Image (cartoon, helix red, strand yellow):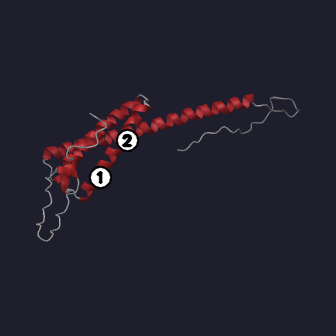
Amino acid sequence: MNMMRRDLPGQATSRTPPAAAPARPGIPARPAPAVRPGAKGDDLLQVIKQLSELLVKENAALKKHRADEVKALTERKEQLARLYQSHMNAVHREPTLVKALDAPKRAALTQSAMRLGDLMQENASLLKANIQSINMFFAAVNDSLKARQEEKAAAYSRRGALNGYTVAKRSLAVSFNQTM
């Protein structure tokens, strides 16, 4: 599947149909285009399938610690997530959009949505784990640098000897922004 595709099958019918154009003197009013029943449900199913495929790829990349692959998927993931959210908002506003689907399509939509939910939970868990591992790595590097700087720093003991062993620890200018 081409991840850079910007359009989705049936996307044109997923928008709210324009109202009938107002009649002008001498020009008859043109009727609003008809949207077939269940078109929103079909579009939602397509979005769910594409988002699920993308999450499978991203989760695999996260498991292999391939940040460049994850980054390449980010823009498309955001687009699909916004589209999914808009479809879900439409379904919440008007549940008949999904009820208009026949039973097999409604069952497929339910199964796809459940699978998407599982993939989203796995994705969130993997992202959190990757963020924590990055933070642990930087904390270890930071601690190592601090320890090394303390070992190399010139200090005087209470007796005035350079690099004495009784030097109290002092804070250094090396720090790490640790936000959670």
Report x, y in % for residue 14: 22, 51
Q: Residue at x 31, y 50 (%)?
A: 85
173 and 35: which is toward the camera: 35
Q: Which mark is residue 98?
A: none
Mark 1 neighbour density, 10 Å: few (under 14) some (14–19) many (20 or more) = some
- Distance from the alpha carbon under mark 2 to that under mark 1: 17 Å
Q: Residue 115: in sight, yes or no?
A: no
Amino acid type at mark 1: Ser
Q: Residue at x 30, y 48 (%)?
A: 83
103 and 57: which is toward the camera: 57
For label 2, the residue is 75
Report x, y in % for residue 56: 32, 34
Left or right of 9: which side holds 67?
A: right
The image quarter in which residue 110 lies: top left
Q: Residue at x 79, y 31 (%)?
A: 154
22 and 78: which is toward the camera: 22
Left or right of 159: which side holds 17?
A: left
The image quarter in which residue 162 lies: top right
Q: Residue furthest right?
A: 159
Q: Residue furthest bottom?
A: 25
The image quarter in which residue 51 lies: top left
Quadrant into which the N terminus falls: top left
Secondary structure, mark 2, is helix
For label 1, the residue is 86
Q: Residue 68: in sight, yes or no?
A: yes
Report x, y in % for residue 135: 54, 36
Q: Residue at x 28, y 34 (%)?
A: 2
Mark 2 neighbour density, 10 Å: few (under 14) some (14–19) many (20 or more) = few
